[in-house]
Image (spheres, rainbow, N blue to C red):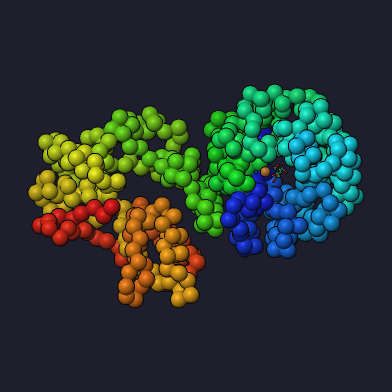
Amino acid sequence: MVEILDTTLREGEQTAYVNFTIDEKIEIARMLDQIGVDMIEAGDPSVSPSVAKAIERIAGLGLKAEIIAHSVASRPSIDRAKNCGAHRVAIFYATSKIHLDAKLHKTQDQALDLICEHIAYARSLGLKVRYTPEDATRTDFDFLVQVCNAAIQAGADRISFADTLGIMQPHIMFERVSALRQRLLSCKIDLHCHNDYGLALANAMAGIRAGADCIHTTVNGLGERVGIPDLAETVMAFHNFEDERKFNIQPLVQISSYLEKVSGFFLAPNKPITGQNAFTHKSGVHTNGILKDPRTYEPFDPAMIGRERKIVIDKYTGKSAVAARLEEYSIAVSPAELEVIVMRIKNMGDNRKQLFDTDIIEIAEQVTGREIDVIPHDINALVMLEVESHVYTSAVVRRLRSFTNVSNVYEVTGEYDISALVNVENVMALNNLIEELRTVTGVKRTETRVILKKYTRSSSGGSQNLS
Ligand code: HCA
Ligand code: CU
Protein backbone atom coordinates (compact mmCIF):
# COMPACT_ATOMS: atom_id res chain seq x y z
CA MET A 1 0.00 0.00 0.00
CA VAL A 2 1.50 3.30 -1.03
CA GLU A 3 1.66 6.07 1.55
CA ILE A 4 1.17 9.73 0.78
CA LEU A 5 2.73 12.59 2.67
CA ASP A 6 1.20 15.86 1.61
CA THR A 7 3.42 18.89 2.05
CA THR A 8 1.19 21.63 0.60
CA LEU A 9 1.57 23.48 3.89
CA ARG A 10 5.40 23.32 3.89
CA GLU A 11 6.78 22.75 0.36
CA GLY A 12 3.60 24.28 -1.13
CA GLU A 13 4.01 27.47 0.85
CA GLN A 14 7.54 27.69 -0.57
CA THR A 15 5.92 28.46 -3.95
CA ALA A 16 6.83 31.92 -5.21
CA TYR A 17 4.30 34.51 -3.94
CA VAL A 18 2.14 31.97 -2.06
CA ASN A 19 1.28 32.39 1.63
CA PHE A 20 -1.62 30.92 3.58
CA THR A 21 -3.35 32.25 6.66
CA ILE A 22 -3.55 30.00 9.72
CA ASP A 23 -7.28 29.43 9.13
CA GLU A 24 -6.64 28.47 5.51
CA LYS A 25 -3.98 26.01 6.66
CA ILE A 26 -6.41 24.42 9.09
CA GLU A 27 -9.02 24.06 6.35
CA ILE A 28 -6.43 22.50 4.01
CA ALA A 29 -5.30 20.07 6.72
CA ARG A 30 -8.90 18.99 7.36
CA MET A 31 -9.50 18.37 3.66
CA LEU A 32 -6.25 16.41 3.36
CA ASP A 33 -7.35 14.29 6.29
CA GLN A 34 -10.66 13.59 4.57
CA ILE A 35 -8.78 12.36 1.52
CA GLY A 36 -6.84 10.10 3.86
CA VAL A 37 -3.22 11.10 3.31
CA ASP A 38 -0.98 9.32 5.79
CA MET A 39 1.08 12.32 6.82
CA ILE A 40 0.72 16.08 6.68
CA GLU A 41 3.90 18.12 6.69
CA ALA A 42 2.53 21.25 8.29
CA GLY A 43 5.49 23.63 8.07
CA ASP A 44 8.86 24.54 9.53
CA PRO A 45 8.18 26.32 12.85
CA SER A 46 11.45 28.25 12.60
CA VAL A 47 10.26 30.11 9.51
CA SER A 48 7.96 32.44 11.44
CA PRO A 49 5.77 32.56 14.55
CA SER A 50 2.65 32.19 12.43
CA VAL A 51 3.99 29.01 10.79
CA ALA A 52 4.69 27.62 14.28
CA LYS A 53 1.19 28.61 15.43
CA ALA A 54 -0.39 26.89 12.42
CA ILE A 55 1.48 23.63 13.13
CA GLU A 56 0.41 23.81 16.76
CA ARG A 57 -3.24 24.33 15.83
CA ILE A 58 -3.15 21.52 13.24
CA ALA A 59 -1.43 19.11 15.64
CA GLY A 60 -4.25 19.86 18.10
CA LEU A 61 -7.04 18.98 15.68
CA GLY A 62 -6.86 15.26 16.38
CA LEU A 63 -6.64 14.33 12.70
CA LYS A 64 -5.91 10.77 11.61
CA ALA A 65 -2.81 11.85 9.67
CA GLU A 66 0.55 12.10 11.38
CA ILE A 67 1.58 15.77 11.71
CA ILE A 68 5.15 16.62 10.79
CA ALA A 69 7.29 19.67 11.42
CA HIS A 70 10.18 20.26 9.02
CA SER A 71 13.43 21.46 10.51
CA VAL A 72 17.04 22.27 9.78
CA ALA A 73 19.63 20.45 11.90
CA SER A 74 19.73 22.85 14.83
CA ARG A 75 18.67 22.31 18.44
CA PRO A 76 16.54 25.47 18.78
CA SER A 77 14.66 24.49 15.60
CA ILE A 78 14.09 20.95 16.84
CA ASP A 79 12.89 22.41 20.16
CA ARG A 80 10.34 24.47 18.24
CA ALA A 81 9.13 21.35 16.43
CA LYS A 82 8.67 19.68 19.80
CA ASN A 83 6.94 22.70 21.33
CA CYS A 84 4.34 22.97 18.62
CA GLY A 85 3.16 19.44 19.29
CA ALA A 86 4.21 17.80 16.02
CA HIS A 87 4.30 14.00 16.11
CA ARG A 88 7.43 13.85 14.03
CA VAL A 89 10.27 16.10 13.02
CA ALA A 90 11.75 15.88 9.53
CA ILE A 91 15.37 16.99 9.78
CA PHE A 92 17.05 17.89 6.52
CA TYR A 93 20.75 18.30 5.92
CA ALA A 94 22.33 18.25 2.47
CA THR A 95 24.79 15.53 1.54
CA SER A 96 25.92 16.32 -2.01
CA LYS A 97 29.43 17.66 -2.58
CA ILE A 98 28.21 20.91 -4.08
CA HIS A 99 25.93 21.61 -1.10
CA LEU A 100 28.55 20.58 1.49
CA ASP A 101 31.28 22.68 -0.16
CA ALA A 102 29.43 25.72 -1.43
CA LYS A 103 26.53 26.09 0.99
CA LEU A 104 27.32 24.39 4.29
CA HIS A 105 31.16 24.52 4.27
CA LYS A 106 31.37 21.12 5.94
CA THR A 107 33.33 17.96 5.22
CA GLN A 108 31.47 14.67 4.85
CA ASP A 109 32.62 13.58 8.32
CA GLN A 110 31.48 16.81 9.94
CA ALA A 111 28.10 16.48 8.21
CA LEU A 112 27.72 12.91 9.38
CA ASP A 113 28.37 13.88 13.02
CA LEU A 114 26.01 16.85 12.89
CA ILE A 115 23.21 14.80 11.38
CA CYS A 116 23.49 12.00 13.94
CA GLU A 117 23.80 14.39 16.85
CA HIS A 118 20.60 16.24 15.93
CA ILE A 119 18.62 13.09 15.24
CA ALA A 120 19.63 11.72 18.64
CA TYR A 121 18.63 15.04 20.22
CA ALA A 122 15.18 14.93 18.60
CA ARG A 123 14.73 11.35 19.76
CA SER A 124 15.67 12.38 23.30
CA LEU A 125 12.72 14.81 23.19
CA GLY A 126 10.43 11.92 22.31
CA LEU A 127 9.94 12.92 18.66
CA LYS A 128 9.79 10.45 15.78
CA VAL A 129 12.39 11.39 13.20
CA ARG A 130 12.60 11.40 9.42
CA TYR A 131 15.95 12.29 8.01
CA THR A 132 16.22 13.92 4.59
CA PRO A 133 19.55 13.95 2.80
CA GLU A 134 18.81 17.07 0.76
CA ASP A 135 20.07 16.77 -2.83
CA ALA A 136 20.31 13.00 -2.31
CA THR A 137 20.20 12.26 -6.03
CA ARG A 138 23.47 14.16 -6.60
CA THR A 139 25.16 12.64 -3.56
CA ASP A 140 27.94 10.08 -3.89
CA PHE A 141 25.96 6.87 -3.49
CA ASP A 142 28.25 5.14 -0.99
CA PHE A 143 28.29 8.24 1.19
CA LEU A 144 24.50 8.46 0.91
CA VAL A 145 24.13 4.90 2.18
CA GLN A 146 26.63 5.59 4.98
CA VAL A 147 24.81 8.75 6.14
CA CYS A 148 21.37 7.18 5.97
CA ASN A 149 22.42 4.11 7.92
CA ALA A 150 24.07 6.31 10.54
CA ALA A 151 20.85 8.35 10.72
CA ILE A 152 18.82 5.18 11.21
CA GLN A 153 21.16 4.04 13.95
CA ALA A 154 20.79 7.45 15.60
CA GLY A 155 17.01 6.94 15.69
CA ALA A 156 15.45 7.93 12.34
CA ASP A 157 12.83 5.45 11.14
CA ARG A 158 12.24 7.19 7.78
CA ILE A 159 14.59 8.42 5.11
CA SER A 160 13.43 10.86 2.45
CA PHE A 161 15.24 10.24 -0.82
CA ALA A 162 15.12 13.83 -2.05
CA ASP A 163 15.47 14.63 -5.73
CA THR A 164 15.81 18.27 -4.80
CA LEU A 165 16.60 19.46 -8.33
CA GLY A 166 14.27 17.09 -10.17
CA ILE A 167 17.05 15.49 -12.20
CA MET A 168 16.00 11.86 -12.00
CA GLN A 169 14.57 9.69 -14.76
CA PRO A 170 12.26 6.76 -13.97
CA HIS A 171 14.74 4.01 -14.91
CA ILE A 172 17.55 5.59 -12.87
CA MET A 173 15.18 6.18 -9.97
CA PHE A 174 14.24 2.51 -10.06
CA GLU A 175 17.88 1.44 -9.90
CA ARG A 176 18.80 3.85 -7.12
CA VAL A 177 15.83 3.04 -4.90
CA SER A 178 16.33 -0.72 -5.42
CA ALA A 179 19.95 -0.32 -4.32
CA LEU A 180 18.95 1.83 -1.34
CA ARG A 181 16.34 -0.69 -0.29
CA GLN A 182 18.99 -3.40 -0.32
CA ARG A 183 21.68 -1.45 1.47
CA LEU A 184 19.71 0.46 4.10
CA LEU A 185 18.99 -0.84 7.57
CA SER A 186 15.33 -1.21 8.47
CA CYS A 187 13.44 2.02 7.67
CA LYS A 188 10.65 3.43 5.55
CA ILE A 189 11.69 5.25 2.38
CA ASP A 190 9.96 8.47 1.29
CA LEU A 191 10.31 9.90 -2.20
CA HIS A 192 10.50 13.67 -2.56
CA CYS A 193 10.68 14.30 -6.29
CA HIS A 194 10.84 17.77 -7.79
CA ASN A 195 9.24 18.32 -11.18
CA ASP A 196 11.87 20.32 -13.06
CA TYR A 197 11.64 18.09 -16.15
CA GLY A 198 7.98 17.17 -15.67
CA LEU A 199 9.02 13.70 -14.48
CA ALA A 200 8.26 13.98 -10.76
CA LEU A 201 5.30 11.62 -10.59
CA ALA A 202 6.83 9.15 -13.06
CA ASN A 203 10.01 9.09 -10.97
CA ALA A 204 8.09 8.66 -7.74
CA MET A 205 6.07 5.77 -9.20
CA ALA A 206 9.26 4.09 -10.36
CA GLY A 207 10.65 4.50 -6.84
CA ILE A 208 7.58 2.87 -5.32
CA ARG A 209 7.95 -0.02 -7.77
CA ALA A 210 11.52 -0.39 -6.54
CA GLY A 211 10.41 -0.77 -2.93
CA ALA A 212 9.96 2.74 -1.48
CA ASP A 213 6.99 3.36 0.79
CA CYS A 214 5.80 6.93 0.45
CA ILE A 215 5.35 9.75 -2.08
CA HIS A 216 5.44 13.41 -1.16
CA THR A 217 2.78 15.51 -2.90
CA THR A 218 1.26 18.97 -2.83
CA VAL A 219 -2.18 20.11 -3.94
CA ASN A 220 -1.92 21.50 -7.49
CA GLY A 221 1.75 20.48 -7.56
CA LEU A 222 2.86 23.60 -5.67
CA GLY A 223 6.41 23.94 -4.38
CA GLU A 224 9.79 25.54 -4.98
CA ARG A 225 10.30 26.45 -8.67
CA VAL A 226 7.90 24.13 -10.52
CA GLY A 227 6.91 22.02 -7.53
CA ILE A 228 6.48 18.33 -6.83
CA PRO A 229 3.83 15.68 -7.78
CA ASP A 230 0.25 16.87 -7.65
CA LEU A 231 -1.91 15.16 -5.03
CA ALA A 232 -4.85 14.49 -7.39
CA GLU A 233 -2.64 13.07 -10.16
CA THR A 234 -0.84 10.84 -7.66
CA VAL A 235 -3.98 9.55 -5.98
CA MET A 236 -5.74 8.90 -9.32
CA ALA A 237 -2.71 7.17 -10.85
CA PHE A 238 -2.56 4.77 -7.91
CA HIS A 239 -6.33 4.38 -7.78
CA ASN A 240 -6.67 3.51 -11.46
CA PHE A 241 -3.37 1.82 -12.32
CA GLU A 242 -2.54 0.06 -9.06
CA ASP A 243 -6.00 -0.53 -7.64
CA GLU A 244 -5.06 1.48 -4.55
CA ARG A 245 -8.36 2.13 -2.79
CA LYS A 246 -7.27 3.60 0.52
CA PHE A 247 -7.77 7.25 -0.48
CA ASN A 248 -11.07 9.07 -0.75
CA ILE A 249 -11.03 10.50 -4.28
CA GLN A 250 -14.20 12.61 -3.97
CA PRO A 251 -12.69 15.73 -2.36
CA LEU A 252 -9.75 15.96 -4.80
CA VAL A 253 -11.38 18.51 -7.08
CA GLN A 254 -12.69 20.56 -4.18
CA ILE A 255 -9.32 20.82 -2.45
CA SER A 256 -7.71 21.77 -5.76
CA SER A 257 -10.22 24.61 -6.29
CA TYR A 258 -9.81 25.73 -2.70
CA LEU A 259 -6.06 25.92 -3.19
CA GLU A 260 -6.48 27.94 -6.38
CA LYS A 261 -8.57 30.37 -4.43
CA VAL A 262 -6.34 30.78 -1.40
CA SER A 263 -3.01 30.64 -3.24
CA GLY A 264 -4.01 32.90 -6.15
CA PHE A 265 -2.12 30.32 -8.21
CA PHE A 266 -4.41 29.19 -10.99
CA LEU A 267 -4.23 25.89 -12.85
CA ALA A 268 -3.28 25.69 -16.50
CA PRO A 269 -6.36 24.45 -18.40
CA ASN A 270 -4.34 21.45 -19.61
CA LYS A 271 -3.37 20.34 -16.11
CA PRO A 272 -4.21 16.59 -15.80
CA ILE A 273 -7.19 15.50 -13.66
CA THR A 274 -8.17 18.89 -12.21
CA GLY A 275 -7.48 21.27 -15.12
CA GLN A 276 -10.41 22.83 -16.93
CA ASN A 277 -9.79 20.87 -20.15
CA ALA A 278 -9.04 17.48 -18.60
CA PHE A 279 -12.36 16.07 -19.87
CA THR A 280 -13.04 18.48 -22.74
CA HIS A 281 -13.18 17.19 -26.31
CA LYS A 282 -12.90 19.13 -29.51
CA SER A 283 -12.19 17.57 -32.90
CA GLY A 284 -15.00 16.01 -34.93
CA VAL A 285 -13.39 12.58 -34.75
CA HIS A 286 -12.97 12.72 -30.98
CA THR A 287 -16.41 14.11 -30.18
CA ASN A 288 -18.06 11.62 -32.49
CA GLY A 289 -16.29 8.83 -30.62
CA ILE A 290 -17.17 10.29 -27.22
CA LEU A 291 -20.83 10.59 -28.13
CA LYS A 292 -20.90 6.95 -29.23
CA ASP A 293 -19.00 5.69 -26.20
CA PRO A 294 -17.01 7.97 -23.86
CA ARG A 295 -14.43 5.22 -23.33
CA THR A 296 -13.10 5.95 -26.83
CA TYR A 297 -11.30 9.08 -25.66
CA GLU A 298 -11.52 9.21 -21.87
CA PRO A 299 -8.99 7.39 -19.69
CA PHE A 300 -11.64 7.21 -16.96
CA ASP A 301 -15.15 8.46 -16.30
CA PRO A 302 -14.93 12.07 -15.05
CA ALA A 303 -17.94 11.38 -12.80
CA MET A 304 -15.59 9.30 -10.64
CA ILE A 305 -14.25 12.56 -9.24
CA GLY A 306 -17.42 14.57 -9.66
CA ARG A 307 -16.45 16.18 -12.95
CA GLU A 308 -18.37 16.44 -16.21
CA ARG A 309 -17.21 15.95 -19.76
CA LYS A 310 -17.49 18.89 -22.07
CA ILE A 311 -17.63 19.12 -25.83
CA VAL A 312 -16.35 22.31 -27.37
CA ILE A 313 -18.13 23.53 -30.46
CA ASP A 314 -16.09 25.45 -33.01
CA LYS A 315 -14.66 25.01 -36.49
CA TYR A 316 -13.29 21.55 -35.64
CA THR A 317 -16.74 20.32 -34.71
CA GLY A 318 -18.55 17.62 -36.63
CA LYS A 319 -22.25 17.08 -37.17
CA SER A 320 -22.79 14.67 -34.31
CA ALA A 321 -21.56 17.11 -31.67
CA VAL A 322 -23.72 19.96 -32.99
CA ALA A 323 -26.74 17.65 -33.22
CA ALA A 324 -26.14 16.52 -29.63
CA ARG A 325 -25.86 20.10 -28.39
CA LEU A 326 -29.10 21.12 -30.16
CA GLU A 327 -30.81 18.06 -28.75
CA GLU A 328 -29.79 19.12 -25.23
CA TYR A 329 -31.95 22.19 -25.80
CA SER A 330 -34.71 20.18 -27.52
CA ILE A 331 -34.12 22.14 -30.71
CA ALA A 332 -35.26 19.98 -33.62
CA VAL A 333 -33.60 20.60 -36.98
CA SER A 334 -33.77 18.73 -40.28
CA PRO A 335 -30.63 17.00 -41.65
CA ALA A 336 -30.36 19.75 -44.28
CA GLU A 337 -30.60 22.48 -41.63
CA LEU A 338 -28.00 20.69 -39.55
CA GLU A 339 -25.60 20.73 -42.52
CA VAL A 340 -26.01 24.48 -42.86
CA ILE A 341 -25.64 25.09 -39.14
CA VAL A 342 -22.39 23.11 -39.05
CA MET A 343 -21.13 24.97 -42.12
CA ARG A 344 -21.89 28.34 -40.52
CA ILE A 345 -20.14 27.28 -37.32
CA LYS A 346 -17.12 26.21 -39.33
CA ASN A 347 -16.99 29.53 -41.16
CA MET A 348 -17.48 31.45 -37.98
CA GLY A 349 -14.90 29.44 -36.08
CA ASP A 350 -12.13 31.00 -38.13
CA ASN A 351 -12.46 34.37 -36.51
CA ARG A 352 -13.77 33.43 -33.10
CA LYS A 353 -11.88 32.12 -30.12
CA GLN A 354 -14.81 30.36 -28.54
CA LEU A 355 -18.45 29.75 -29.40
CA PHE A 356 -20.90 29.89 -26.54
CA ASP A 357 -24.27 28.15 -26.50
CA THR A 358 -25.92 31.52 -27.12
CA ASP A 359 -24.12 31.68 -30.48
CA ILE A 360 -25.16 28.17 -31.46
CA ILE A 361 -28.79 28.85 -30.60
CA GLU A 362 -28.56 32.07 -32.55
CA ILE A 363 -27.22 30.29 -35.64
CA ALA A 364 -29.97 27.69 -35.34
CA GLU A 365 -32.52 30.51 -35.22
CA GLN A 366 -31.12 32.10 -38.34
CA VAL A 367 -30.91 28.86 -40.28
CA THR A 368 -34.35 27.52 -39.34
CA GLY A 369 -36.05 30.93 -39.43
CA ARG A 370 -37.84 30.04 -36.21
CA GLU A 371 -37.56 31.88 -32.94
CA ILE A 372 -35.99 29.56 -30.38
CA ASP A 373 -36.90 30.42 -26.86
CA VAL A 374 -34.36 28.66 -24.66
CA ILE A 375 -31.95 29.92 -22.08
CA PRO A 376 -28.39 28.75 -22.61
CA HIS A 377 -26.93 26.44 -19.96
CA ASP A 378 -23.65 28.26 -20.00
CA ILE A 379 -23.73 31.72 -18.61
CA ASN A 380 -22.33 35.02 -19.78
CA ALA A 381 -22.45 37.72 -17.17
CA LEU A 382 -21.21 41.21 -16.56
CA VAL A 383 -19.71 41.62 -13.13
CA MET A 384 -19.45 45.25 -12.02
CA LEU A 385 -16.80 45.89 -9.37
CA GLU A 386 -16.23 48.83 -7.09
CA VAL A 387 -12.61 49.29 -6.03
CA GLU A 388 -11.46 50.63 -2.63
CA SER A 389 -10.40 54.27 -2.98
CA HIS A 390 -6.81 53.63 -1.83
CA VAL A 391 -6.20 50.84 -4.36
CA TYR A 392 -5.11 51.33 -7.97
CA THR A 393 -7.87 50.15 -10.31
CA SER A 394 -5.22 48.89 -12.73
CA ALA A 395 -3.83 46.57 -10.02
CA VAL A 396 -7.25 44.98 -9.61
CA VAL A 397 -7.65 44.73 -13.39
CA ARG A 398 -4.33 42.90 -13.64
CA ARG A 399 -5.49 40.38 -11.04
CA LEU A 400 -8.88 39.87 -12.71
CA ARG A 401 -7.24 39.10 -16.03
CA SER A 402 -5.55 36.04 -14.49
CA PHE A 403 -8.96 34.37 -13.94
CA THR A 404 -9.59 31.88 -16.73
CA ASN A 405 -13.33 32.57 -16.82
CA VAL A 406 -12.93 36.30 -17.14
CA SER A 407 -12.76 37.06 -20.85
CA ASN A 408 -12.79 40.86 -20.96
CA VAL A 409 -12.17 43.55 -18.42
CA TYR A 410 -13.09 47.23 -18.83
CA GLU A 411 -12.35 50.21 -16.62
CA VAL A 412 -15.57 52.22 -16.68
CA THR A 413 -17.04 55.48 -15.40
CA GLY A 414 -19.95 55.72 -12.99
CA GLU A 415 -20.86 54.01 -9.77
CA TYR A 416 -18.57 51.06 -10.46
CA ASP A 417 -14.93 51.16 -11.51
CA ILE A 418 -14.58 47.93 -13.47
CA SER A 419 -16.81 45.80 -15.62
CA ALA A 420 -15.73 42.21 -16.26
CA LEU A 421 -17.28 39.91 -18.82
CA VAL A 422 -17.32 36.34 -17.53
CA ASN A 423 -18.31 33.01 -19.04
CA VAL A 424 -19.01 30.03 -16.82
CA GLU A 425 -20.64 26.62 -17.16
CA ASN A 426 -23.54 27.05 -14.75
CA VAL A 427 -25.01 29.07 -11.89
CA MET A 428 -22.94 27.30 -9.27
CA ALA A 429 -19.75 28.15 -11.15
CA LEU A 430 -20.94 31.75 -11.44
CA ASN A 431 -21.51 31.95 -7.69
CA ASN A 432 -18.08 30.50 -6.99
CA LEU A 433 -16.42 32.89 -9.42
CA ILE A 434 -18.15 35.92 -7.91
CA GLU A 435 -17.04 34.80 -4.47
CA GLU A 436 -13.48 34.53 -5.76
CA LEU A 437 -13.65 37.94 -7.42
CA ARG A 438 -14.78 39.39 -4.10
CA THR A 439 -11.65 38.07 -2.40
CA VAL A 440 -9.37 40.01 -4.75
CA THR A 441 -7.56 42.63 -2.70
CA GLY A 442 -9.09 46.05 -3.27
CA VAL A 443 -12.52 44.86 -4.42
CA LYS A 444 -15.13 46.59 -2.27
CA ARG A 445 -18.37 45.27 -3.74
CA THR A 446 -19.73 43.63 -6.85
CA GLU A 447 -22.97 43.49 -8.77
CA THR A 448 -23.67 40.88 -11.39
CA ARG A 449 -25.89 41.06 -14.45
CA VAL A 450 -26.56 37.82 -16.30
CA ILE A 451 -26.67 38.30 -20.07
CA LEU A 452 -29.80 36.82 -21.59
CA LYS A 453 -29.21 37.69 -25.22
CA LYS A 454 -26.72 39.71 -27.19
CA TYR A 455 -27.58 42.00 -30.12
CA THR A 456 -25.39 43.67 -32.67
CA ARG A 457 -26.04 47.29 -33.66
CA SER A 458 -26.61 46.46 -37.31
CA SER A 459 -28.36 43.10 -37.18
CA SER A 460 -32.09 42.69 -37.28
CA GLY A 461 -32.51 40.96 -33.97
CA GLY A 462 -29.44 38.77 -34.33
CA SER A 463 -27.26 38.35 -31.26
CA GLN A 464 -23.51 38.47 -31.36
CA ASN A 465 -20.81 36.55 -29.65
CA LEU A 466 -18.75 38.66 -27.29
CA SER A 467 -15.14 37.75 -27.75
C1 HCA B 1 14.46 22.01 0.20
C2 HCA B 1 14.25 20.81 1.07
C3 HCA B 1 13.44 19.73 0.47
C4 HCA B 1 13.32 18.67 1.54
C5 HCA B 1 12.60 17.42 1.16
C6 HCA B 1 12.27 16.50 2.30
C7 HCA B 1 14.09 19.18 -0.83
O1 HCA B 1 13.62 22.92 0.24
O2 HCA B 1 15.44 22.04 -0.51
O3 HCA B 1 12.47 16.86 3.48
O4 HCA B 1 11.80 15.39 2.06
O5 HCA B 1 13.53 19.34 -1.90
O6 HCA B 1 15.20 18.65 -0.71
O7 HCA B 1 12.14 20.20 0.12
CU1 CU C 1 11.50 20.00 -1.90
Q: Position of residue 273 (x, y in %)?
A: 49, 41
Q: Position of residue 367 (x, y in %)?
A: 12, 45
Residue at 46%, 45% in the rendered image: 268
Q: Nearer the viewer, residue 242 or 195?
A: 195
Residue at 72%, 61% in the rendered image: 48
Number of disc labels: 0
Q: Nearer the viewer, residue 293 or 49?
A: 49
- 156 on left or right of 176: right
Q: Position of residue 419 (x, y in %)?
A: 34, 65
- 163 on left or right of 441: right
| 461, above or below 130, in the image | below
Residue at 81%, 55% in the rendered image: 77
In terms of image quarters, where does ligand 2 lie?
top right
Q: Position of residue 327 (x, y in %)?
A: 23, 43
**Residue that sits furthest to the front in the current view:** 102
Residue 457 visible at all:
yes
Quarter of the image with the N terminus is: top right
Residue 392 in which image quadrant: bottom left
Residue at 12%, 58% in the rendered image: 458
Q: Nearer the viewer, residue 427 or 122?
A: 122
